[in-house]
Image: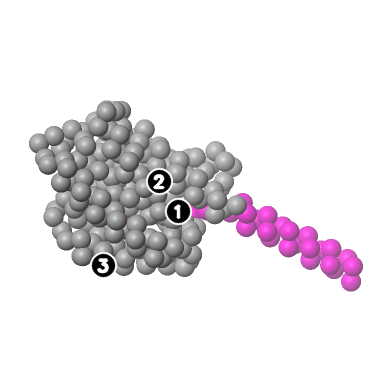
């Protein structure tokens, strides 16, 4: 009997060790800010996040990304409905809304569609809200691309949309990272803008990735 117990404990410890070293899976949902428009693919924030976690000896698969430049909330939703996902994922990030604002779509529509997307993100994370991270919408109004636009109007609308996604994130008790102030530093720091004069640079994505990595590390521990 004693021998049997020792074998059982050994198998149990081996099983736990395996579970701890099994690569974690991360799904990133969004638009151009998620794919990293105008920067090398490995420099977008999901890939930089994974690279940072690997430096902490966390086994990670390459991130799964559902995102495309120009997507609004409903377009992201449509693509998700067409995509077969091997769920659950260990972590899911959601960053969407800038194109709703850019196209003049209503805040009420954004609120409804964003909430639906967040509900899906939580289900993709195995119904674990603490394994879902919402990132705020960057302020493109500070970029060279917007030099002939009403930058104050853009900022106010971005703030209004972010107030919506933050409120919904809190409602569902997911993590929320406000990266908008980072993007607004581009007013005085051109190194934070990609060569296209509109999207964030790899340097700025690196700062987002560090914040995402910190949240994930807390949940992993």
Graded by Cα atoms within 10 Å as few (under 14), some (14 to 19) or many (20 or more), the crowding at tag 1 reads many
Q: Is residue 68 visible?
A: no
Identify the residue at horizontal 48%, vertical 45% (top origin): 213
Graded by Cα atoms within 10 Å as few (under 14), some (14 to 19) or many (20 or more), the crowding at tag 3 reads few
Query: Vertical placement of 51 versus 4: above or below?
Result: above
Identify the residue at horizontal 29%, vertical 53% (top origin): 162
Identify the residue at horizontal 13%, vertical 55% (top origin): 104
In this orientation, which residue lies closer to the viewer: 214 or 29? 214
What segment is highlighted magenta in the picture?
1-30
3D distance between C-alphas at marks 3 and 2: 25 Å
Quadrant location of the N terminus?
Answer: bottom right
Residue 112 image label: 3
Provide residue 210's location: percent of width, then percent of height. Answer: 45, 41
Extreme left residue here? Answer: 148
Provide residue 112's location: percent of width, then percent of height. Answer: 26, 67
Disc 3 + disc 1, Cβ < 8 Å: no
Residue 46 sits inside the magenta stretch: no
Secondary structure type for disc 2:
helix
3D distance between C-alphas at marks 3 and 1: 25 Å
Disc 1 + disc 2, Cβ < 8 Å: yes
């Amino acid at each position: 009997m004693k021998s049997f117990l020792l074998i059982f404990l050994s198998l149990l410890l081996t099983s736990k060790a395996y579970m701890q070293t099994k690569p974690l899976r991360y799904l990133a949902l969004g638009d151009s800010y998620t794919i990293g428009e105008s920067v090398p693919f490995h420099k977008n924030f999901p890939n930089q996040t994974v690279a940072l976690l690997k430096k902490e000896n966390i086994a990670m698969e390459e991130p799964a990304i559902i995102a495309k430049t120009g997507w609004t909330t409903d377009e992201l939703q449509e693509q998700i409905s067409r995509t077969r996902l091997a769920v659950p994922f260990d972590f899911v990030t959601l960053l969407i809304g800038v194109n709703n604002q850019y196209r003049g779509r209503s805040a009420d529509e954004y609120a409804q569609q964003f909430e639906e997307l967040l509900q899906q993100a939580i289900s993709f994370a195995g119904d674990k809200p603490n394994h879902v991270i919402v990132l705020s919408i960057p302020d493109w109004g500070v970029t060279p691309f917007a030099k002939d636009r009403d930058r104050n109007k853009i900022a106010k609308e971005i703030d209004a949309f972010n107030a919506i996604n933050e409120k919904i994130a809190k409602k569902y008790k997911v993590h929320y990272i406000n990266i908008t102030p980072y993007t607004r530093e581009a007013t005085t720091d051109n190194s934070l803008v990609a060569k296209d004069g509109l999207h964030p640079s790899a340097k700025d994505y690196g700062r987002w990735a560090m914040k995402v990595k910190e949240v994930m590390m807390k949940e992993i521990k």
